Image (cartoon, grey):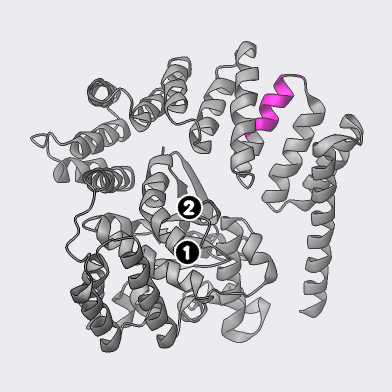
Amino acid sequence: MLTRIILLVTFLLVASMPPALAQSQPRRQFIRDAEVENTIRTFGTPIFQAAGLDPSAVRINLIIDSTLNAFVAGGQNIFFHTGLLVRSEHPGQLIGVMAHETGHIAGGHLIRSTDAMASASTEAILATLLAAAAGAASGRGDAAAAMMLGGNELAMRSLLAFSRSQESQADQMAMRFLDDTRQSGKGLIEFFEILGDQEALVSSRQDPYVRTHPLTRDRVSFVRNAVEHSPYSKTPWPPEWVEMHKRMKAKLFAFIEPPIRTFQRYKETDASIEARYARAVAAYRKPDVAMALGLIDGLIKERPNDPYFWELKGQMLFENARGTEAVEPYRKAVKLLPDSALLRIALGQVLIETEDPAMLGEAETHLTAAVNREPEDRFAWQQLAIAFGRNGKEGMASYALAEHYMLSGKLSEAQFHANKAEQLLGKQGSVWLRIQDIKERASHVRAEQERGRKWW
């Protein structure tokens, strides 16, 4: 569900700017959605395996931005702008881009501005890139505020850009990955044609992908030739992938664009799954809850084992002050997709919000499972701390808060709660070991920050 949106400060010094200037700066947002992420991961897993990567180690990150862009940074992280996802016409175009970006990972072309970036949270990675862009422009940290007023584009471009030789190498690897997985490379050449249409535009109007991934005639010629000679160039995409792609586009469009635009694009006469899905989201956002529930109930009746339809129904109910009614739809979603950390987090939050003490144990179970699968999700740790606290488990609540504050970059709070948890829980078990890790990490980051202040 597109309910968890993480605002990213465009630069680290935004808080120090005059309010009027700070409000005028564009913001990027991370979004989390189980269906969208699982769709992209389904498309990407064969490519990752062909590249010799562990698919579970590759992190998929979504940024609300209407421009066409994708990039890799901070280890095995692939970032997608929603504009690229929505504008892709079929799975092949998105898979072609993923194969190319995977080529950058496999080819060792990643940015290594700091050793910590490879293990940092996705929010920290992007914040690091943005802050580094400010400093890169002049070599001075105090120039970041000035860079925020519009001069950061050049520095960001230089940080994220690859050389022409690296682009060519990534293309070669992409075509190999596609052939190894018996997939057509037509999508990549089609994507290049989209980019080619932008080369005549002035730089400020080009999509970021054009500016950070230089497109040359040699690159286009190589990919076109590789596609023409591939035995898999006419291989069709699995029908289920085609539907997944259509649903992903419809869902993103409906959540991001104004409802009126969704109703214009996905007209009432369109009875396809994706159109009814989009209209259900648009009605929920309008808000017309009766219409939204009618549409989603119709989809559930048609496909009772679809976890994402149940999830959306739970979201509709929960966000319209019908939390108790939302529990069962979320339970069904989790039962159908038990490995989804995001679904378990959502269910855990709903269970807590019912304010029924009998629900707290179940909330703990789901949230604990979620943080085990996604230990960097600070919202999940926060919710787990609430569940522990309301259930009278003060020591575990402090431990969960220590994890939450550590991920949030609030070192003093993290150390305070780590010390408190250690006092309450004693010096035994895996939790105690993790508490020591938090304390050590907090001290290390503090020391690095102090050295940085002295250097400037």
Mark 1 vs mark 2: in front: 2
Q: Is residue 249 left or right of residue 77?
A: left
Front residue of 304/249: it is 304
Question: CB of mark 1 within 8 Å of CB of mark 2?
Answer: no
| C-alpha separation, residue under disc 1 versus residue under disc 2 | 16 Å
* Residue 17 placement: quadrant: bottom right
Position in image of residue 32 (x %, y %): 46, 45
Q: Can residue 221 be seen in this view?
A: yes
Q: Is residue 319 visible?
A: no
Between 90 and 195, the one nearer to me in the picture: 90
Disc 2 designates what residue?
30
Please determine whether, in this image, residue 160 is positioned above or below residue 32. Answer: below
Identify residue for label 1. Answer: 25
Identify the residue at image location x=72%, y=25%. Answer: 388
Q: What residue type is labelled 1?
A: Gln
Quarter placement of the N terminus: top left
| Amino acid on which the number 2 mark rests in the picture | Phe
Picture coordinates of residue 113, whole percent (x, y) = 63, 75
Left or right: 121, with 346 as reference point: right
Image: 336 above or below 106:
above
Q: Residues within 10 Å of mark 2 (few under 14, many from 20)?
A: many
Q: Relative to residue 147, is residue 440 depicted above or below?
A: above
Q: Give the range drawn in magenta.
A: 383-392
Taking depth in this image into account, of 154 and 437 the one nearest to the observer is 437
Q: Is mark 2 on a helix, strand or loop?
A: strand
The answer to whether residue 36 is magenta is no
Q: Looking at the rendering, which quadrant does residue 441 occupy?
A: bottom right
